[in-house]
Amino acid sequence: MTPRPGKARTLKHGRPDREPGLKRANFGHGPGLPTLLLLPQFLILVFFFFIPSLRALMQSVLLSDPFGNNVHFVWFDNFTALFANGEYRQSIVTTLWFTVAQNVITLAVAVVLAFATDRVVRARSVYRTVILLPYAIAPAIAGILWAFLFNPVVGPLAHMLHALGIGWDPNRNPSDALRLVIMAASWKHICYNYIFLAVGLLAVPASLMEAAAVDGAGPIRRFFLIALPMLGPTVFFLAVMNFIYGFFETFAIIDAVTHGGPAGATNILVYKVYVDGFVNLDLGSSAAQSVLLMTFALICTLLQFRYFDHKVNYGV
Amino acid sequence: MVERAPVLDTICHAILIAGALLVCVPLYFAFVAGSLTIAEVQKVPLPWLPGDQFVANLQAAWVKADFGRTFLNSILVAVGIAAGKIAVSLLSAFAITYFRFRYRMLAFWLIFMSLMLPIEVRIVPTFEAVANAALPLQWLADALHVSGLWKWISGHDVAIALEWNMVNTYPGLILPLIASATATFLFRQFFLTVPDELCEAARLDGASPLRFFWSILLPLSVSNIVALAIILFLFGWNQYLWPLLFTTDKDMATAVIALKNLIPRSDNEPAWNIAMSGALLTMLPPTLVILLLQRWFLKGLIDSSK
């Protein structure tokens, strides 16, 4: 077999002739210089990443009183206690509902907008620039903007709802509060999904679309039968990113707008980690929750790599 | 475009205009509310046209949220995160792609492990680590049961003797946010596409590794660096949870955190006009960055997520 470009050449017995991710033209040096180069990154990672993560792992199997005088090793009691706790189960349900709704809305709107952008010729870059803007806006600010629009006393959109006879009040009505944060979170994140889809559509081969057009497929049919399946990995990537965004970055929206209320209606998991750790000082439980969230984040990362690693071109 | 479909094209324009409105309506209402007096902002319904208090409200928000100080903090934190992360990432990516050494794969996997675990999930232990950066030494002391001995010898508690408090400092705000390896992977990916001949030529000319890094690799990476710097600046400017924990000292608050304190908490004193002015001010720097550097920004966004 002749070596193909983009693949590591293999020796006769089938082993790669070099380590993955190492340049063929390398400096082969002893350990001194590379260690020095890696040192800054590793110091930061050790102190602010590995130690905190390990500590969370350790703390999740310990039980300590608030003053830290009495520490017991309790195996998985913190975890079983969590799942026995109705509040935590409620928080899981809230988070899933919030994240799934946000994901669906964000992707659906972004797909429609990306399709439209791909069709139009005039003013395309103007549309793209405007729709891109929320990326610049902090999640907390997005939350504040929507909290104002839907503020039951002064908000203009809340007034429209009231005029229609809808008794909107996110400060008192739990499901209204959840809807409000879903709207704010989706608004902030549509631009991210949109850009990836719009760029992805540009890469769909024109010859494929033309062939389908010759066969009599209309633009919408072509989009759903050819372009969107070709964007499959991108959509998958975005769905994973949306879950990560929904699980973690929306903390700011919750904290700035609803504080997890009313009646725990917007108390998503990452907010609960914060409240249990910093307000209630229940470190064992907070750490157990951290560990569960970390596991989730790692699964997302691995899923992403499974889908994307084979597409990355390591060709040297 | 393959065929003419004027109706569909009109619909597409309508969809895009709706999308643009979806983005602009909240911003427009923020502008309207930010230009009214506090009496007008409480009027039902809210006026559709802006009032004349825009500048006055901006000034009020600027003073009330101490934006002079908090903007400076935000800029320092955002630039610090961008510069710090890019610097350490360039060095480590250079090390794992251009050097063959014994623990290369171990180093690679350790960096890989830190990819994309957001700070939010390890917030309590990270806070403890930053509040007391010498904690590992203390563990060692505890594990070896020398704490009691030390106390007996010196009369001091080990915990207090070792404490190195980073709360309310810029390194404390910046370093934990640098601690993830996304940028390292971006640069690694890029370095792998750099032609081998460049390195070979440099070596033939007798260039040292650092010389090659500085004179050849770095200039080649400029566009990646700029693109990533924009993304990281926005990331740093928009941080929330971590700065929130550090605002025990008001002088260390960032702009987003200061803005949070402008939101009316009760309906008795609904100073939404000031809050909205503040929101517009706080989103101005990142918006300008995107508008002015859009081309680079898009490149960075697409690259850094692969």
Image: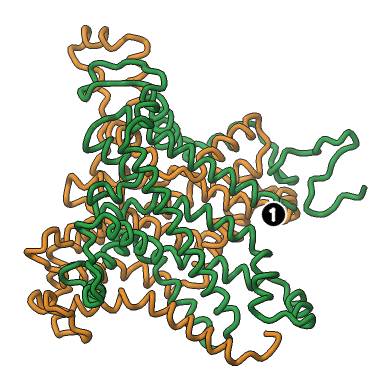
Eyeballing the image, is B147 above or below B19? Answer: above
Letter of the chain shown orange in the rendering: B
Residue depicted at x 22% and y 61%? B259
| Image-quadrant location for residue A45 | top left
Return the residue nearer the eye: B222 or B60: B60
Q: Is A164 left, or right, of A250 in this rendering?
A: left
At label 1, the amino acid type is: Lys
Residue B93 coordinates in the image, percent (x, y): 58, 46
Residue depicted at x 51% and y 81%? A125
Looking at the rendered structure, the secondary structure element under dot 1 is helix
Name the colouring of the figure. by chain
Q: Which residue is mark 1?
A: A311
If the image is split into quadrants, where does the N terminus of chain B sit? bottom right
Eyeballing the image, is B300 above or below A254? Answer: below
Residue A34 coordinates in the image, percent (x, y): 59, 37
Residue A229 in view here: yes
Eyeballing the image, is A148 above or below A171? Answer: below
Eyeballing the image, is B63 above or below B96? Answer: below
Letter of the chain shown green in the rendering: A
Q: Chain of mark 1?
A: A
Residue depicted at x 39% and y 28%? A79
